[in-house]
Image: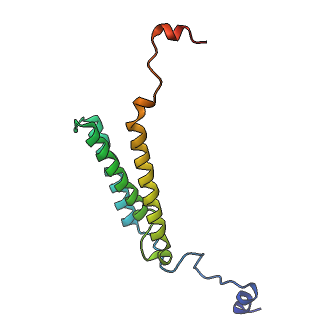
Amino acid sequence: MSSNAHEEHHGHDHGHDHGHGHDASHGSLKSYVIGFVLSVILTAIPFWLVMGEVIENKAALVAAIMILGAIQIVVHMVYFLHMNTKSEGGWTMMALIFTIVIVAIALAGSLWVMYHLNTNMMPAMSPEMMRNLP
């Protein structure tokens, strides 16, 4: 059986496609290094902002950390997940939009929960109340 007849008989090609789209970008060492460096910087800046007490206003500090976190998500999606408008016939762009919507909901929900945390907590217990617990 010839090689072509064998491929036709089994109904698949033994080429180097491996199920990936022709436009799929797998990245280069340079793009991975850029993504890694950006990720480290975007992790170090919030750490420095909190530990160095650079921003006095807590709301501004939280906003800065959230913005840097959102930027880091985009960096990971572009440099490590290779999401762009060309790959997979545009479906990765749809996944990107879906991810942005989910991240926005998660960030807004997290801020809402943290803002209302004090009103939803149990009242402070006095030492006498703690002694009476079972």
Q: Name the one closer to the observer, 89 or 116.
A: 116
Question: Residue, x 40% and y 48% (percent of image)?
Answer: 108
Question: Residue, x 76% and y 88% (percent of image)?
Answer: 9
The image shows residue 79 at horizontal and vertical percentages of 40, 63
Instruction: From the viewer's perspective, tell me whether residue 11 is left or right of residue 122.
Output: right
Q: Name the one closer to the observer, 110 or 50.
A: 110
In the image, residue 69 sits, relative to residue 125, either above or below, namely below
Question: Residue, x 40% and y 35% (percent of image)?
Answer: 116
The image shows residue 49 at horizontal and vertical percentages of 27, 40
Which quadrant of the view contains residue 30?
Answer: bottom left
- Name the residue at the front extreme: 119
Which quadrant of the view contains residue 126?
Answer: top left
Q: Name the one closer to the observer, 56 or 27.
A: 56
Question: Residue, x 28% and y 40% (percent of image)?
Answer: 59
The image shows residue 100 at horizontal and vertical percentages of 42, 60
The image shows residue 15 at horizontal and vertical percentages of 61, 82
